[in-house]
Amino acid sequence: MADHIVTESELVLPALWLMNRKTDGFIETSELIRELTNIIQPIGIDAEILDGRNDTYFSQKVRNLKSHKTFERNGYATDVLNGFRITEMGRMIISAKGEAIAHLRRLRHRRFPSLLA
């Protein structure tokens, strides 16, 4: 079976979960990359270093959440200097996806299926 390639949309819920755990709802992009890497443990092409870069395909997907304004477009978080801050809408998504969040906790150190599909 081929390795699952993580999509940008699959990063949304776990990223919101990580922001929601912070008292002020803020997470720096570098911390988000580190934490999502620990949770998802990218494999295959996602774990490969980009040509001419020092980061992986996976970390670039996390950075794309910022450049593509994924959270802002959906109203889930605001783009702030060096990171993101969860909005009330983002907190509502986390609250509504309780079962998925429980699943994420169980899989904290393993791969996970799309949680926002």
Image: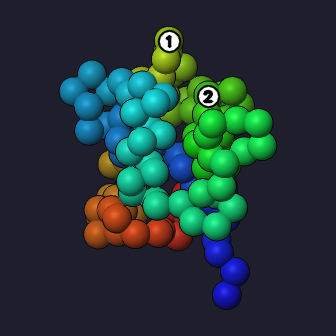
| Residue 30 screen position, x and y as percent | 46, 30
- Report the residue at 65% width, 75% height from top: 3
Counting residues from the start of the chain, the first of labels 1 and 2 encountered is: 2
In the image, residue 35 above or below residue 6: above
The residue at the point 46 percent across, 61 percent down is 41
Q: Position of residue 37 (x, y in %)?
A: 45, 51
Q: Which amino acid, mark 1?
A: Leu
Q: In which quarter of the image is residue 103?
A: bottom left
Tell me the kind of residue under disc 2. Answer: Lys
Number of numbered labels in the structure image: 2
Asked if 36 appears above or below 67 in the picture, the reply is below
Residue 87 visible (yes or no)? no
Q: Nearer the viewer, residue 48 or 34?
A: 48
* Dot 1 crowding, Cα within 10 Å, few <14, some 14–19, many 20+: few
Q: Residue 66 carries which label?
A: 2
Q: Which residue lies furthest to the top in this view?
A: 81
- With 111 as the anchor, is 49 left or right in this view? right
In the figure, residue 75 lies in which quadrant?
A: top right
Q: Label 2's element?
A: helix
Q: How is the image coloured?
A: rainbow
Asked which secondary structure carries label 1, the reply is: loop
Q: Residue 59 carries which label?
A: none
In this view, the residue in front, 98 or 39, is: 39
The label shown at residue 81 is 1
- Up the image or down, 45 lies above or below 27; here it is below
Percent of width and height locating residue 117:
60, 62
Q: Distance between the residues labelled 1 and 2?
A: 10 Å
Q: Where is residue 23 in the image (x, y as percent from the top left)?
A: 21, 27
At 76% across and 36% down in the image, what residue appears?
A: 52
